[in-house]
Amino acid sequence: MSKEEKVCNESILNTVGNKLSNVSEKVMPSPLIFALLLTFVSFILGITLAGNTPLQMVDHWYAGFWNLLAFGMQMALILVTGHALTRAPQVNNLIKKLAGLPSNNPQAAGLTALVACLVGYFHWGFGLIVGALFAVEVAKQAHRRGIKLHYPLIAAAGYTSQLVWHIGPSTSAGLLSATPGHIYEDLIGIVPLSESVFSIYAILLAILLCIFVIPISFYLMAPKNEENCKTIATLSPKLLEQDEHGIEDEKIANPTFGDKLDHSRLIAYIVGIMGAVAIVLYFVARGFTLDLNIFNFIFITVGFILHGTPTRYANAIGEAVGGASGIILQFPFYAGIMGMIQYSGLAVIAAQWFLSFATASNFPVVAWLTGAVMNIFVPSGGGEWAVIGSIMSEVSLALGVPIGKTIVAYGCGDMWTNMLQPFWAIALLGITQLKARDIIGYTVTIMLITGPFIGLALYFFPY
């Protein structure tokens, strides 16, 4: 069979994904450069559209630069604690067992997408790391068995947790709106998760995306011919040299008293028990309400219990911190972009333009598109909601659309363009040892595929 015949034998989705991948390899910058370019674009738009002077825009940039420090720390903890949990022996062994199931490209891509989506639905940070580690493990085990997998596609499938997370319980906008004292409490009150991501509206959408659309699309996107594959051995050969196990305790021949404390299971379990009691007391006092702080607290508690010693958990956290480097460096720049958009009036201009089309029936779709555009400039669900949540809430109330429904629709937009905005891929790229340009063609393809499904679901699904 000729090369042309082998290419023609591939599916339409595979062809589209490959074409977009080829384009992204040539034009896609690194996530940091992407953030800096968006800074310049926001600066220019603030001058041309909002009528601000260059000095005013610089002032807005600095005014917003440090506004996300607390939220950035919460996001970093979600990512780091989620990563640390995957390195616990129990979780690590489960990942290895599941990763050995696929025997060809379609099975590997579909299963990786399914695992990433299901885990990411419940916890975006955990899902991001599990998806990345699972993609690597699938590729490594396939290499050992002589199966050639298209590694960029498998890694892209591992990133799909970021396409479903904002309609799950780790939703930033939903958790913020459910937290007493949030910035819009005077306007919308406390919005429990039962009215947003735990509504039938969001649950049906999650089932549609997580179980059907995304895994099936990646299954169909996978190349059938091994000659068309770029393998892990070609792109990330160093990963094949690693023998990954869960984090293990250091063996000390003559442990001192301090060493025994460092490696004490008793101390880890006491912390775990105290944490478990605190979690129970929290839910007894507040009911089943989640916010960012309790989410992180739960993962820290479970991490201590599963790792079993303070040192083992500390080592897992230390290993995971590198994946949060993008948050640490880039969050201030995105906060600066947020400052320019918010203080210059660009946010109001953009939101009002989108919302000028809104009616009670199409408002969820309009909110979705608004969130999608805003996410490109401010890739933080909570940060975006802080910028445009007020105007979206006011229109939602004026049109008689439930606030919980608006939060879900906005969240769909935020997560949808994660497939184009490479910020949250930083941790996955570090784990898979790929570049953003390697996977963006495939993530943009799944973004285009899921768009009609999301739009129709937001319009027609019951609330």
Image (cartoon, grey):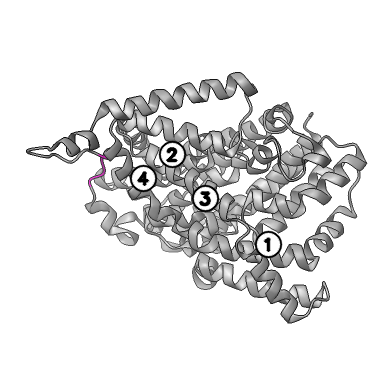
**Who comes first in sequence, dot 4 or dot 3?**
3
Tell me how far mark 4 sits from mark 1, CA to CA.
29 Å
Q: Which residues are magenta?
A: 243-247
Helix, strand or loop at label 3? It is helix
Tell me how far mark 3 sits from mark 2, CA to CA.
37 Å
Q: Position of residue 263 (x, y in %)?
A: 22, 35
Q: Position of residue 85 (x, y in %)?
A: 39, 37
Tell me how far mark 2 sits from mark 1, CA to CA.
41 Å
Q: Position of residue 57 (x, y in %)?
A: 72, 75
Q: How many marks?
A: 4
Helix, strand or loop at label 2? It is helix
Helix, strand or loop at label 4? It is helix
Reading the image, the residue beneath label 3 is 73
Question: Is residue 139 left or right of 157 when viewed as pictured?
Answer: left
Q: Residue at the spot x=58%, y=66% of the render? A: 333
Query: What is the number of the mark on residue 338?
Result: 1
Reading the image, the residue beneath label 4 is 317
Residue 391 vs residue 128, the one in the foreground:
391
* Of the two numbered discs 2 and 4 in the rendering, the one whose residue sits closer to the viewer: 4
